């Protein structure tokens, strides 16, 4: 906080920590802005980029709601994954562009997290070709999954479904959120320019539209040497 700020500016800076302001914000201010300036739900998955470096190790965070979220239903989903996971991972080997993939069970959702190279739609098409028939068994446990089975006969529909259930990836630079919000409503990005002071409010409103998000595109690198190799060359180790 700058010492040159006036008393009112300093007081405003403390509002977010005051109980009465938190109450007013939660029950009055935020609902008002949700009504006054709602934000569209932004699509999931990585965005198209002309930069080659942005098209490697792209993240997919597929969040699939379970058809039966009870303990029995969750156990059944785990069992189905366990019975088919070897074939799925073998199929991902055949896709050839996947760096890693894993399944998570979070509350009432089955999640598949993966990193791949190249175009999203091509990745899903290759995925269906190699493991579609096996993945169909998992889709029997997913809410709305029956409409996509067999996936090999519903390729475009399945791609759209995956895209809708892939987490929105927040931009690495917060101010880029403005452009994404503008594009979603058909407005030319940053025309007119947004006030930086409105960023916290717009972020809060976006989190209302997209409650679950991926924080940025993640760290990607192909290091030439490991830390252990560097230590070995310098004769330093533990």
Image (cartoon, grey):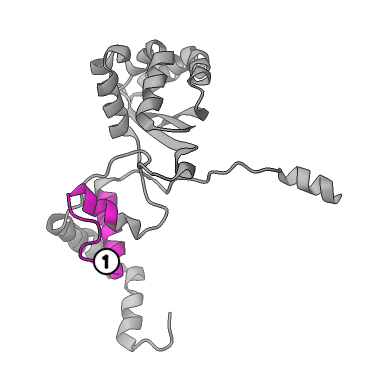
Q: Which residues are magenta?
A: 179-208
Q: Is residue 36 left or right of residue 184?
A: left
Q: Quadrant of residue 130?
A: top left
Residue occupying the point 13% across, 55% down: 35
The reply to whether the magenta stretch includes residue 205 is: yes
In percent of width and height, residue 25 lies at 24, 64
Name the foreground residue: 143 vs 22: 143
Q: Is residue 138 left or right of residue 209?
A: right
Q: Is residue 37 above or below residue 127?
A: below
Let me know if residue 108 appears in the view.
no
Q: Quadrant of residue 126?
A: top left
The reply to whether the magenta stretch includes residue 180 is: yes
Residue occupying the point 47% across, 33% down: 117
Name the foreground residue: 166 vs 94: 94
In percent of width and height, residue 66 lies at 32, 25
In what element is the residue under mark 1? helix
The crowd level at tag 1 (other Cα within 10 Å; few <14, some 14-19, many 20+) is few
In percent of width and height, residue 177 lies at 31, 55
On-image quarter of the N terminus: bottom left
Residue tagged 1: 198
In percent of width and height, residue 155 lies at 29, 19
Residue occupying the point 24% across, 56% down: 189
């Amino acid at each position: 906080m700058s010492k040159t700020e006036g008393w009112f500016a300093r007081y405003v800076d403390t509002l977010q920590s005051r109980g009465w302001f938190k109450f007013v914000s939660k029950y009055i201010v935020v609902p008002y802005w949700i009504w006054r300036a709602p934000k569209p739900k932004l699509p999931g998955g990585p965005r198209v980029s002309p930069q080659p470096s942005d098209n490697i190790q792209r993240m997919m965070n597929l969040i699939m709601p379970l058809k039966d979220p009870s303990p029995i239903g969750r156990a059944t989903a785990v069992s189905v994954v366990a019975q088919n996971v070897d074939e799925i991972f073998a199929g991902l080997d055949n896709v050839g562009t996947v760096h890693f993939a894993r399944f998570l069970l979070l509350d009432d959702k089955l999640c598949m997290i993966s990193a791949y190279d190249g175009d999203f739609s091509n990745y899903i098409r290759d995925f269906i070709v190699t493991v579609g028939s096996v993945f169909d068994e998992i889709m029997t446990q997913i809410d709305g999954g029956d409409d996509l089975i067999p996936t090999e006969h519903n390729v475009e529909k399945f791609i759209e479904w995956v895209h809708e259930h892939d987490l929105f990836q927040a931009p690495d630079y917060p101010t880029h959120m403005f452009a994404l919000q503008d594009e979603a409503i058909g407005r030319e990005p940053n025309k007119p320019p947004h006030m930086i002071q409105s960023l916290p409010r717009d972020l809060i409103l976006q989190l209302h539209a997209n409650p679950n998000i991926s924080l940025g595109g993640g760290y990607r690198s192909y290091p030439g040497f490991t830390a252990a190799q560097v230590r070995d060359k310098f004769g330093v180790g533990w």
